[in-house]
Amino acid sequence: MKPVLIVYARALIPGEVKTRLIPKLGALGAAQLHEAFVEDTLRMVNGLSETFDLELHTDVPTEAWSWKGVRRVQSAGDLGAKMYTTIQDALDAGRPFVMIVGSDSPTLPAKFLKEMSGSNADVVLGPTKDGGYYAIGCRKADPQMFAGVTWSCDATRSQTIDAVRRCGLSVECGPEWFDVDQPQDLELLIESGVGGRTLQVLSGCGLAPRAKSAWLSVVIPTLNESTVIARTLDAVSRLSVNVEVIVVDGQSEDDTARIARQHGATVLSTSRGRGLQLRMGAERATGDVLWFLHADSTPSPDAEQRIRQALEARQVIGGNFDLVFDGGSNAARKLTRIYPHLRKLGLCYGDSGVFVRRDVYDAAGGFRAYPLFEDLDLIKRIRKHGRFVHLDSQIVTSSRRFEGRSFGLMFTKWTAMQLLYWAGVHPGVLGRWYLPIRGKGGKVQR
């Protein structure tokens, strides 16, 4: 069986949740913030569904929050009794590892939980700055592992560690983060670069965070991408607390823009055309580094770190990533095999996650409003300013433009357009020849 990750949350009852925030926000405001905390936590853990089975456990039955995982109700007793029962039941059911995560750390990076799951200790704790812990993971349990622990105090974590060790179990601590219990914690939350539903609620309460300069701006062009944009934004949101996300929508006819706003992205609207959309997004961006992603492309958790490391060398002006096409279809397998060979020829495309220093982008003239090959055109110009690197970190993208069609015919057409472009035919002319093809998920493909 897979490990299981369980989100603990209290049911949404105004006046009974986040009570220590009521003097600051009022009962309704505190309840709304609690609702947002849980929603953003659930969105975060959804990105770990390949590693864990996911469950939501509440103190009483509730249908609050949209959640497609397993819902359960916590057992009776204090927090320690509830957690022990949850952990032991899961271990008895054959789970090799059980993790419980609270809902008071809405900006918690998902990579922290994944790192904790790699511990070989019997018990691993995710420490918070106030002496508690945001998560506990167990490979073994004991009925006395929470004996003598006083909850919601600055000694909670140290008392838990002592109790676990008295049971003969090994214990480790993962990366430190913070949770939000007291009014003073709201300032830390605001400074952390909060997004998602939590940001909306804070803004509604008059606590909008001050403008904070991001080192990295992610620009995503969209057109009718409601089926995929949430997954991409979820992945981006887990990269760093200091990343600006700009979605430039080409007047979608579906819920793309609404979904992007719900995920905390800045949403701009412009005419259709990827080159135009990317140019507009870059003009609005404030980061020192620009990273251009497609709406159906999911970066790996280490992507932001890898970009930062690559740009430590001043001669490096930008780069891109390995590209893997999703699914087990014939088209996906062929495309994944083909792209490394294209890279050997010096070819790389926008769906491989191109990043570039802002000053180099500006010096090169930025994206041109081409209907086709705007990515090749930009990369050709920025390469004149320094070293363009390829990172061996993966971006997973969709093969939907080729699904349900003759792969050979589509690839032949794509190759012919490439040859015409390199022969000097203007992208504007090629764009008129190459009629849009609507792929799966509603995306207009080129």
Image (cartoon, helix red, strand yellow):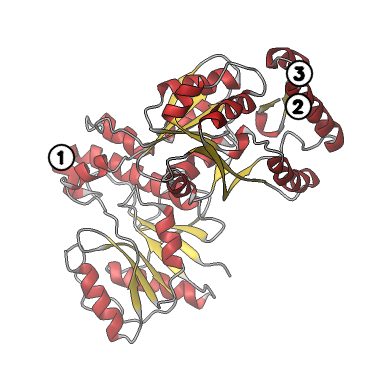
Residue denoted by label 2: 418
In the image, residue 174 above or below residue 295 = below
Question: Toward the viewer: 266 or 261?
Answer: 266
Q: Residues within 10 Å of mark 1 (few under 14, many from 20)?
A: some
Q: For marks 3 and 2, give the one nearer the viewer.
A: 2
Question: Toward the viewer: 378 or 278?
Answer: 378
Residue drawn where x is 34% and y is 57% of the image: 102
Q: Is residue 181 left or right of residue 288?
A: left
Helix, strand or loop for disc 1: helix
In the image, residue 368 above or below residue 152 = above
Marks 1 and 3: in contact by CB < 8 Å? no
Residue drawn where x is 48% and y is 28% of the image: 247
Question: Toward the viewer: 217 or 377?
Answer: 377
Q: Which mark is on residue 158?
A: none
Residue denoted by label 3: 435
In the image, residue 204 above or below residue 62 = above
Q: Position of residue 284 (x, y in %)?
A: 41, 22
Q: Is residue 152 left or right of residue 346?
A: left
Q: For marks 1 and 2, give the one nearer the viewer.
A: 2
Decide which of tag 1 and tag 2 comes sooner along the chain.
1
Q: Position of residue 372 (x, y in %)?
A: 67, 21
Decide which of tag 3 and tag 1 comes sooner along the chain.
1
Q: Residues within 10 Å of mark 3 (few under 14, many from 20)?
A: few
Residue drawn where x is 43% and y is 71% of the image: 119
Q: Amino acid at mark 1?
A: Lys
Helix, strand or loop for disc 3: loop
Residue denoted by label 1: 24
